[in-house]
Image (spheres, helix red, strand yellow):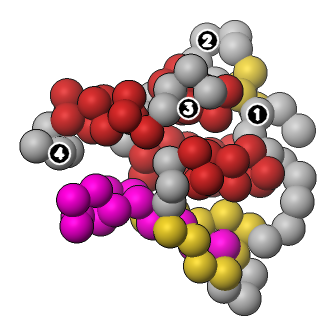
Amino acid sequence: MEFLAAGNEIMQLKIQEMHGVFKKLRMETRPGKHHDHAYLWVKGNLVVRTRVSRGSGDIPMPAIYQILHQFHLNRDQFTSLKKCPLDLNGYIEILKSQGMLE
Protein backbone atom coordinates (compact mmCIF):
# COMPACT_ATOMS: atom_id res chain seq x y z
CA MET A 1 0.00 0.00 0.00
CA GLU A 2 1.35 3.45 -0.88
CA PHE A 3 0.50 6.78 0.67
CA LEU A 4 0.54 10.31 -0.68
CA ALA A 5 3.01 12.52 1.10
CA ALA A 6 3.88 16.14 0.32
CA GLY A 7 3.26 17.11 -3.29
CA ASN A 8 2.82 14.21 -5.66
CA GLU A 9 5.37 11.98 -3.99
CA ILE A 10 4.41 8.66 -2.48
CA MET A 11 5.55 7.47 0.95
CA GLN A 12 5.50 3.83 1.86
CA LEU A 13 6.69 2.31 5.11
CA LYS A 14 6.81 -1.36 5.96
CA ILE A 15 7.02 -2.82 9.45
CA GLN A 16 10.31 -4.56 8.56
CA GLU A 17 11.78 -1.19 7.53
CA MET A 18 10.89 0.19 10.97
CA HIS A 19 12.73 -2.71 12.61
CA GLY A 20 15.73 -1.79 10.44
CA VAL A 21 15.51 1.79 11.73
CA PHE A 22 15.38 0.48 15.30
CA LYS A 23 18.59 -1.51 14.71
CA LYS A 24 20.32 1.33 12.88
CA LEU A 25 19.68 3.76 15.74
CA ARG A 26 20.50 1.07 18.33
CA MET A 27 17.11 1.55 19.93
CA GLU A 28 16.10 -0.50 22.93
CA THR A 29 13.19 -2.76 21.89
CA ARG A 30 10.67 -4.59 24.00
CA PRO A 31 8.07 -6.99 22.67
CA GLY A 32 4.50 -6.38 23.70
CA LYS A 33 1.37 -8.42 23.20
CA HIS A 34 0.39 -6.73 19.92
CA HIS A 35 3.22 -4.24 19.31
CA ASP A 36 6.98 -4.00 19.52
CA HIS A 37 7.99 -0.95 21.54
CA ALA A 38 11.23 0.94 20.80
CA TYR A 39 13.10 3.56 22.82
CA LEU A 40 16.07 5.74 21.91
CA TRP A 41 18.12 7.00 24.83
CA VAL A 42 20.83 9.64 24.34
CA LYS A 43 23.00 10.54 27.34
CA GLY A 44 20.38 9.09 29.68
CA ASN A 45 17.50 11.05 28.13
CA LEU A 46 14.59 9.41 26.33
CA VAL A 47 14.54 11.00 22.88
CA VAL A 48 12.16 8.73 20.94
CA ARG A 49 9.46 6.35 22.09
CA THR A 50 7.46 4.55 19.43
CA ARG A 51 5.82 1.25 18.61
CA VAL A 52 4.88 -0.84 15.59
CA SER A 53 2.57 -3.76 15.10
CA ARG A 54 4.04 -7.21 15.58
CA GLY A 55 2.57 -8.22 12.23
CA SER A 56 4.03 -7.70 8.78
CA GLY A 57 3.22 -5.56 5.81
CA ASP A 58 2.57 -1.85 5.45
CA ILE A 59 2.13 0.70 8.19
CA PRO A 60 -1.09 2.72 7.73
CA MET A 61 -0.85 6.39 6.81
CA PRO A 62 -2.03 7.82 10.18
CA ALA A 63 0.65 5.76 11.94
CA ILE A 64 3.31 7.00 9.48
CA TYR A 65 2.50 10.61 10.39
CA GLN A 66 2.68 9.71 14.07
CA ILE A 67 6.09 8.05 13.57
CA LEU A 68 7.43 11.12 11.76
CA HIS A 69 6.30 13.26 14.69
CA GLN A 70 7.77 10.88 17.27
CA PHE A 71 11.15 10.89 15.50
CA HIS A 72 11.05 14.71 15.06
CA LEU A 73 11.79 14.29 11.34
CA ASN A 74 10.16 15.41 8.12
CA ARG A 75 9.34 12.94 5.37
CA ASP A 76 12.62 13.45 3.49
CA GLN A 77 14.75 13.10 6.63
CA PHE A 78 12.95 9.91 7.63
CA THR A 79 13.35 8.50 4.12
CA SER A 80 17.11 9.14 4.40
CA LEU A 81 17.09 7.38 7.76
CA LYS A 82 15.36 4.25 6.47
CA LYS A 83 17.36 4.12 3.20
CA CYS A 84 20.74 4.46 4.98
CA PRO A 85 22.34 7.83 4.13
CA LEU A 86 21.37 9.10 7.60
CA ASP A 87 23.02 7.31 10.52
CA LEU A 88 22.76 7.66 14.30
CA ASN A 89 25.30 10.50 14.47
CA GLY A 90 23.53 12.41 11.69
CA TYR A 91 20.18 11.87 13.41
CA ILE A 92 21.57 13.22 16.68
CA GLU A 93 22.87 16.30 14.81
CA ILE A 94 19.36 16.92 13.43
CA LEU A 95 17.91 16.69 16.94
CA LYS A 96 20.56 19.12 18.20
CA SER A 97 19.76 21.60 15.41
CA GLN A 98 16.09 21.45 16.46
CA GLY A 99 17.01 22.12 20.08
CA MET A 100 15.87 18.64 21.18
CA LEU A 101 19.38 17.79 22.47
CA GLU A 102 22.33 19.77 23.75
Q: Is residue 59 magenta?
A: no
Q: Is residue 11 above or below residue 100?
A: above
Element type at mark 4? loop
Residue 12, which numbered label? 1
Q: Main SS type for the magenta part? A: strand
| Disc nearer the start of the sequence (2/3) | 2
Of circles 2 and 1, which is in front? Answer: 1
- Tell me the crowding category of disc 2: few under 14, some 14 to 19, or many 20 or more residues within 10 angstroms, Cα based: few
Rendered image quadrant of residue 35 = bottom right
Q: Is residue 57 above or below residue 93?
A: below
| Disc nearer the start of the sequence (2/1) | 2
The residue type indicated by label 1 comes to: Gln
At a point 85% along the width and 68% down the height, the residue shown is 55
Q: Position of residue 49 (x, y in %)?
A: 43, 64
Element type at mark 2? loop
Rendered image quadrant of residue 92 = top left
Q: Is residue 27 above or below residue 76?
A: below
| Disc nearer the start of the sequence (4/2) | 2
Disc 2 target residue: 7
Of circles 2 and 3, which is in front? Answer: 3
Residue 81, which numbered label? 3
| Disc nearer the start of the sequence (3/1) | 1
The residue type indicated by label 2 comes to: Gly
Q: Position of residue 12 (x, y in %)?
A: 76, 33
- Tell me the crowding category of disc 3: few under 14, some 14 to 19, or many 20 or more residues within 10 angstroms, Cα based: many
Q: Which residues are magenta?
A: 36-48
Disc 4 target residue: 101
- Tell me the crowding category of disc 1: few under 14, some 14 to 19, or many 20 or more residues within 10 angstroms, Cα based: some
Q: Are marks 2 and 3 in contact (CB under 8 Å)?
A: no
